[in-house]
Image (spheres, helix red, strand yellow):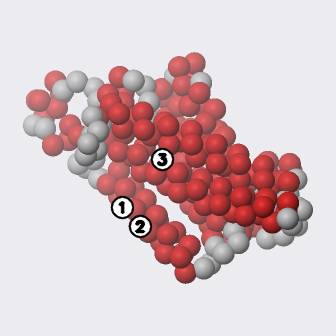
Amino acid sequence: MFDDAMWAFGRASGIIAMLLLTVSVLLGIVTRSGRPLPGLPRFSVSVVHRNVSLMSAVFLVLHISTLLLDSYAKLNLTDILVPFLGADKPLWLGLGTVAFDLFLAVAVTGLLHHRIGTRAFRAVHWLAYAMWPFALLHGVFDGTGGTSAWFLLGAGTALAAVIAAVIWRISAGFMETASLPSRRRAEAPAPDFQLRRTS
Protein backbone atom coordinates (compact mmCIF):
# COMPACT_ATOMS: atom_id res chain seq x y z
CA MET A 1 0.00 0.00 0.00
CA PHE A 2 2.79 2.43 0.95
CA ASP A 3 4.73 1.69 -2.24
CA ASP A 4 1.59 2.10 -4.35
CA ALA A 5 0.96 5.49 -2.77
CA MET A 6 4.58 6.57 -3.33
CA TRP A 7 4.44 5.41 -6.94
CA ALA A 8 1.18 7.26 -7.63
CA PHE A 9 2.36 10.43 -5.91
CA GLY A 10 5.75 10.28 -7.62
CA ARG A 11 4.09 9.93 -11.01
CA ALA A 12 1.58 12.74 -10.40
CA SER A 13 4.19 15.13 -8.98
CA GLY A 14 6.45 14.46 -11.97
CA ILE A 15 3.66 15.30 -14.41
CA ILE A 16 2.78 18.48 -12.51
CA ALA A 17 6.46 19.48 -12.33
CA MET A 18 6.77 19.03 -16.12
CA LEU A 19 3.67 21.13 -16.71
CA LEU A 20 4.94 23.89 -14.43
CA LEU A 21 8.39 23.80 -16.05
CA THR A 22 6.73 24.26 -19.44
CA VAL A 23 4.72 27.24 -18.22
CA SER A 24 7.85 28.65 -16.59
CA VAL A 25 9.82 28.45 -19.85
CA LEU A 26 7.01 30.13 -21.76
CA LEU A 27 6.62 32.87 -19.15
CA GLY A 28 10.37 33.39 -19.08
CA ILE A 29 10.33 34.07 -22.82
CA VAL A 30 7.41 36.50 -22.46
CA THR A 31 9.16 38.23 -19.56
CA ARG A 32 12.31 38.67 -21.63
CA SER A 33 10.31 40.33 -24.40
CA GLY A 34 9.09 43.03 -22.04
CA ARG A 35 5.49 42.50 -23.14
CA PRO A 36 2.43 42.15 -20.89
CA LEU A 37 -0.02 39.26 -20.93
CA PRO A 38 -3.79 39.73 -21.26
CA GLY A 39 -5.15 40.71 -17.86
CA LEU A 40 -1.71 41.21 -16.34
CA PRO A 41 0.40 44.36 -16.15
CA ARG A 42 3.86 43.79 -17.59
CA PHE A 43 5.66 43.79 -14.21
CA SER A 44 3.38 40.97 -13.03
CA VAL A 45 4.60 38.62 -15.76
CA SER A 46 8.02 38.31 -14.12
CA VAL A 47 6.39 37.79 -10.72
CA VAL A 48 4.19 34.99 -12.07
CA HIS A 49 7.22 33.48 -13.85
CA ARG A 50 9.17 33.41 -10.59
CA ASN A 51 6.28 31.92 -8.62
CA VAL A 52 5.61 29.22 -11.21
CA SER A 53 9.32 28.36 -11.20
CA LEU A 54 9.24 28.01 -7.41
CA MET A 55 6.19 25.76 -7.62
CA SER A 56 7.90 23.61 -10.23
CA ALA A 57 10.85 23.25 -7.83
CA VAL A 58 8.48 22.11 -5.06
CA PHE A 59 6.88 19.43 -7.22
CA LEU A 60 10.25 18.36 -8.61
CA VAL A 61 11.52 17.78 -5.08
CA LEU A 62 8.32 15.89 -4.24
CA HIS A 63 8.75 13.78 -7.39
CA ILE A 64 12.31 12.82 -6.50
CA SER A 65 11.65 12.33 -2.79
CA THR A 66 8.73 9.98 -3.28
CA LEU A 67 10.66 7.88 -5.80
CA LEU A 68 13.51 7.58 -3.30
CA LEU A 69 11.01 6.08 -0.87
CA ASP A 70 9.43 3.80 -3.48
CA SER A 71 10.90 0.29 -3.38
CA TYR A 72 9.76 -0.28 -6.97
CA ALA A 73 11.75 2.63 -8.38
CA LYS A 74 14.83 1.74 -6.30
CA LEU A 75 16.46 5.14 -6.78
CA ASN A 76 19.39 6.32 -4.70
CA LEU A 77 21.19 9.64 -4.31
CA THR A 78 23.72 8.72 -7.01
CA ASP A 79 20.91 8.23 -9.52
CA ILE A 80 19.60 11.70 -8.68
CA LEU A 81 22.89 13.58 -8.89
CA VAL A 82 25.07 11.59 -11.32
CA PRO A 83 23.54 10.84 -14.75
CA PHE A 84 23.50 7.56 -16.68
CA LEU A 85 24.45 5.25 -13.80
CA GLY A 86 20.98 3.87 -13.08
CA ALA A 87 20.36 0.15 -13.29
CA ASP A 88 17.02 0.53 -15.10
CA LYS A 89 16.76 2.64 -18.30
CA PRO A 90 20.04 4.45 -17.59
CA LEU A 91 19.76 6.76 -20.63
CA TRP A 92 16.27 8.06 -19.90
CA LEU A 93 16.81 8.19 -16.15
CA GLY A 94 20.10 9.96 -16.83
CA LEU A 95 18.38 12.61 -18.90
CA GLY A 96 16.11 13.28 -15.94
CA THR A 97 19.19 13.58 -13.75
CA VAL A 98 20.81 16.01 -16.20
CA ALA A 99 17.60 18.06 -16.25
CA PHE A 100 17.60 18.15 -12.44
CA ASP A 101 21.26 19.21 -12.31
CA LEU A 102 20.59 21.99 -14.83
CA PHE A 103 17.54 23.03 -12.84
CA LEU A 104 19.69 23.31 -9.73
CA ALA A 105 22.20 25.49 -11.60
CA VAL A 106 19.46 27.82 -12.85
CA ALA A 107 17.76 27.96 -9.43
CA VAL A 108 20.97 28.66 -7.49
CA THR A 109 22.09 31.42 -9.86
CA GLY A 110 18.58 32.87 -9.66
CA LEU A 111 18.88 33.06 -5.87
CA LEU A 112 22.38 34.60 -6.19
CA HIS A 113 21.41 36.95 -9.03
CA HIS A 114 22.38 40.13 -7.22
CA ARG A 115 25.72 38.66 -6.13
CA ILE A 116 26.88 37.19 -9.42
CA GLY A 117 25.56 39.92 -11.69
CA THR A 118 23.10 39.98 -14.55
CA ARG A 119 25.52 38.77 -17.22
CA ALA A 120 26.43 35.55 -15.37
CA PHE A 121 22.81 35.04 -14.35
CA ARG A 122 21.58 35.27 -17.95
CA ALA A 123 24.36 33.01 -19.24
CA VAL A 124 23.40 30.23 -16.83
CA HIS A 125 19.68 30.89 -17.36
CA TRP A 126 20.09 29.79 -20.98
CA LEU A 127 20.50 26.27 -19.58
CA ALA A 128 16.72 26.22 -19.12
CA TYR A 129 16.44 25.68 -22.88
CA ALA A 130 18.48 22.48 -22.54
CA MET A 131 16.84 21.40 -19.28
CA TRP A 132 13.30 21.38 -20.67
CA PRO A 133 13.72 18.86 -23.55
CA PHE A 134 15.78 16.57 -21.31
CA ALA A 135 12.99 16.60 -18.74
CA LEU A 136 10.39 15.94 -21.43
CA LEU A 137 12.33 12.98 -22.88
CA HIS A 138 12.76 11.61 -19.36
CA GLY A 139 9.02 11.84 -18.77
CA VAL A 140 8.11 10.14 -22.05
CA PHE A 141 10.58 7.27 -22.00
CA ASP A 142 11.18 6.68 -18.28
CA GLY A 143 7.85 7.66 -16.79
CA THR A 144 5.09 5.12 -16.24
CA GLY A 145 2.52 5.71 -18.94
CA GLY A 146 4.87 8.11 -20.73
CA THR A 147 4.00 6.60 -24.10
CA SER A 148 0.23 6.53 -23.46
CA ALA A 149 -1.93 8.53 -25.86
CA TRP A 150 -2.98 11.21 -23.37
CA PHE A 151 0.60 11.81 -22.20
CA LEU A 152 1.96 11.97 -25.74
CA LEU A 153 -0.80 14.41 -26.68
CA GLY A 154 0.12 16.64 -23.75
CA ALA A 155 3.83 16.33 -24.49
CA GLY A 156 3.24 17.16 -28.15
CA THR A 157 1.19 20.22 -27.24
CA ALA A 158 3.88 21.40 -24.83
CA LEU A 159 6.58 20.79 -27.42
CA ALA A 160 4.71 22.78 -30.07
CA ALA A 161 4.18 25.67 -27.63
CA VAL A 162 7.84 25.80 -26.60
CA ILE A 163 9.10 25.53 -30.19
CA ALA A 164 6.78 28.37 -31.24
CA ALA A 165 7.96 30.48 -28.29
CA VAL A 166 11.64 29.82 -29.06
CA ILE A 167 11.11 30.76 -32.73
CA TRP A 168 9.48 33.98 -31.54
CA ARG A 169 12.37 34.46 -29.08
CA ILE A 170 14.97 34.48 -31.87
CA SER A 171 12.87 36.53 -34.30
CA ALA A 172 13.72 40.13 -35.16
CA GLY A 173 10.50 41.49 -33.66
CA PHE A 174 10.82 39.69 -30.32
CA MET A 175 11.56 42.67 -28.07
CA GLU A 176 8.64 44.99 -27.46
CA THR A 177 10.76 47.97 -28.50
CA ALA A 178 11.55 46.34 -31.87
CA SER A 179 8.32 47.71 -33.32
CA LEU A 180 9.23 51.30 -32.45
CA PRO A 181 10.98 53.64 -34.90
CA SER A 182 14.74 53.64 -34.33
CA ARG A 183 14.83 57.04 -32.60
CA ARG A 184 11.98 56.19 -30.22
CA ARG A 185 13.53 52.76 -29.60
CA ALA A 186 16.80 54.39 -28.49
CA GLU A 187 14.89 56.67 -26.12
CA ALA A 188 12.55 53.98 -24.79
CA PRO A 189 12.97 53.04 -21.10
CA ALA A 190 14.28 49.61 -20.19
CA PRO A 191 11.56 46.94 -19.83
CA ASP A 192 10.41 46.11 -16.33
CA PHE A 193 12.23 42.77 -16.35
CA GLN A 194 15.56 44.65 -16.65
CA LEU A 195 14.63 47.19 -14.01
CA ARG A 196 13.70 44.38 -11.64
CA ARG A 197 16.60 42.16 -12.59
CA THR A 198 14.48 39.14 -13.27
CA SER A 199 14.31 36.89 -16.27
Residue 58 visible, this angle: yes
Q: Which residue is mark 1?
A: 164
Q: Point out residue 38 in the picture as x, y percentages from the top left corner.
A: 25, 46
- Placement of 45 over or under 77, stated as above or below: above
Q: Which residue is mark 2?
A: 160
C-alpha distance separating marks 3 and 1:
15 Å
Q: Residue placed at 40% from the left, 35% from the top?
A: 46
Q: Amino acid at mark 3?
A: Ser
Mark 1 or mark 3, which is nearer the start of the sequence? 3
Q: Disc 3 vs disc 2: Cβ atoms closer than 8 Å?
A: no
Q: Amino acid at mark 1?
A: Ala
Q: Amino acid at mark 2?
A: Ala
- Along the line of sight, which residue is nearer the eye, 119 or 135? 135
- Placement of 109 over or under 19, stated as above or below: above
Q: Point out residue 4 in the picture as x, y percentages from the top left corner.
A: 81, 66
Q: Nearer the viewer, mark 3 or mark 2?
A: 3
Q: Point out residue 48 in the picture as x, y percentages from the top left corner.
A: 42, 38
Numbered disc 2: secondary structure: helix
Q: In the current view of this chain or complex, which residue is farthest to the front?
A: 1
Task: Check the picture and name the quadrant holding the N terminus.
Answer: bottom right
Q: Residue placed at 54% from the left, 25% from the top?
A: 113
Q: Which residue is mark 3?
A: 24
Q: Point out residue 144 in the picture as x, y percentages from the top left corner.
A: 70, 72
